[in-house]
Image (tube, rainbow, N blue to C red):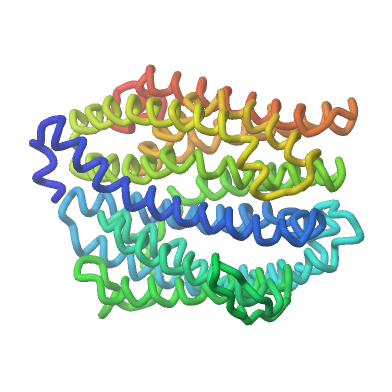
Amino acid sequence: MYKKFIRKDSLAMMGIILGLAWPTILEQVMQTAVQYVDTAMVGSLGTQATAAVGATGTIGWLVFSSISAFGVGFLAIIAQACGANDRGTAQRAVSQAVMVVLVIGAVFTALTLSLSGMIPAWMQVDSAIRPMASQYFFILYLSMLPRTASTIFGTVLRAAGDTKTPMKVGVIVNILNVILNFLLIYPTRTVSLGALSFVMPGAGLGVIGAAAASTAAFTWGGIQITWVLWRHPMVSPRGMRLKPDMSILKPCMKIAIPNMLQRFGTSFGYVAFAAMINSLGEVATAAHTIANTVESAFYIPGYGMQTAAATLAGNAYGARDEKRLKSLAAMFIPIEVVLMIFSGAALFFTARPLMGLFSGSEDVILLGTTVLQMVAVSEPLYGVSIIIEGMMLGMGETKRPFLYNIIGMWGIRIVATFITTQLMHMGLVAAWACMIAHNVLLFVMFLVSYIRGTWNPMHKSHREQQ
C-alpha cells in the first residue's frame, strides 16, 4: 500500500487520507455517543451522581495519557518500518508492545485500585459524594489491564494501516456498554413504546451499575482486540519472544518518554484544573463535566485526522521521502481547518440543547452553554496544532510537542486559572477563558514551528538545531 502511495496524485492521496481517517472518526463518534448516553443516564439520577462520576474523570486522562505515550512510541516505529517495508522490525516492535502491556497494565491496576479511596479527597470532591466517587472509580479501574491492551494494541493496528479493526471492536464495546447500563443502572420498571408496554429488568445499582457496565464492556474489548492482533496477517506477535529487545525499546523510549512527560504534565494539569473547578461547587462541577462531554464530540474530526496524519507521516519518514511529507502537510492542514470551522459552528449553535440533554438544572445548562459557545470559536485554531503535532509524533519528534504543551498548560492555563478562581474568586467562565488562551498559544507555537520547518526532522532548519 505504502509504496503505491508514493506516486499517487493529489486526488488519490486524499482518498488514502480519508480511508485511514474515517474508521477512527467513526470509532470516536461511537465512543462519544456512548459517553453522551452514559452522562444522560447518570444525569437522570441527579446532580450529585453526575458530579461523583465526573469529579475523578481527569485521573483517567492522567492514567491513559501516560499509557498512550507508549503507544505513540510503537506507532512511530511500526509506521516507519511499514514505510520502509521492514516487516521484521514491525513484528519485533509488536512483541515488545505485548510485553509493555503486561507490565504497565499490572502496575497501573495496583496503583489505581490502592489509591481509589484517597483520590476523591485529593480532587477536592464535596465530602457528601466522596464515597460514591471512590466506589465508582474502584470498579471502573478493575478493567485496567484490558483497557491498556485496547489502548496500545489499537495504536499498533492503526500504525500498520488497519484502522477498521479498532473501530469495529470499539463499536461493539460501546453497544455492550449501553445495554449493560440499561440493565444495571435502573431498577426493574415498565417501559412504554407507543401502545407497547413491557417490563425491563434492572439491578437498580445507580452510579455503581454504570461503573460495572463500563468495566465489563472494556474487559471484552481488551480481550477481543488482543485476539485480533494475535491473528493479524502482518503484525502478529506469534512466534516472537517476550523478552526485552533493546534495539526496539531504546528508540521507542526515546520517542515515548518525552510524550509521556508531556501527557503526564498536561494531564496532571487537567487534574489541577478540575480540582480548582470542583472547589467552585456542585453546579460548576456538573456544568464543567457535561460541557467537557459535549465538547469532546466536536473534536472528533480533528483527532480522527490526527491519527491518519501520524501514520502517513511516519510512512513517509520511514521511506525518507520529504517531498511526500510536505505534500501531506499541505493537504492535511486545510482539510482540518475546514472540518473544525464546521465543527465549531455546530457546537456554538447546539450548545444549549445538548446541555439540556444531560441536566434538568437551569443553572447548569446556562453555565455550560456559555463556556461551550466560548470554546467553539477557538476550535479551528486548535485543529491546526492537532495536525502538526500528529505528524511530528508519527515521525518520532516528541520533544517540541512536550515543550509546547507544558508551557501552554502550566504557563497559561493553570497559573491563570489559579489567579482568577482562587485569588480573584471568579467562576467557571474565567477558568474556560484560561483554557482557550492555552489553545491559542498552542496554535501559535505549532504554526511557527511549521513555517520555520523545525517540525520536520528531515528539514535543514531542524537538523541545525540538533
Is 21 rendered above or below residue 440?
A: below
Residue 409 picture quarter:
top right
Residue at 69% over, 73% down = 186
* Nearer the observer, 174 or 20: 174
Between 454 and 118, the one nearer to me in the picture = 118
Q: Position of residue 220 (x, y in %)?
A: 47, 76
Residue 98 horizontal/vertical position (percent)? 40, 71
Residue 103 makes an appearance in the image? no
Left or right, 301 with reference to 369:
left
The answer to whether one can see residue 321 in this image is yes
Residue 19 in the image: state x and y as whole percent: 24, 47
Left or right of 243? Residue 434 is right
Residue farthest toward the front in the current orientation of the protein:
195
Residue 323, placed above or below residue 174: above
Q: Please state if 43 lies on the left or on the right of 447 as rendered.
A: right
Quadrant of the image containing the C terminus:
top left
Locate residue 304: give its quadrant.
Answer: top left
Figure disc tally:
0
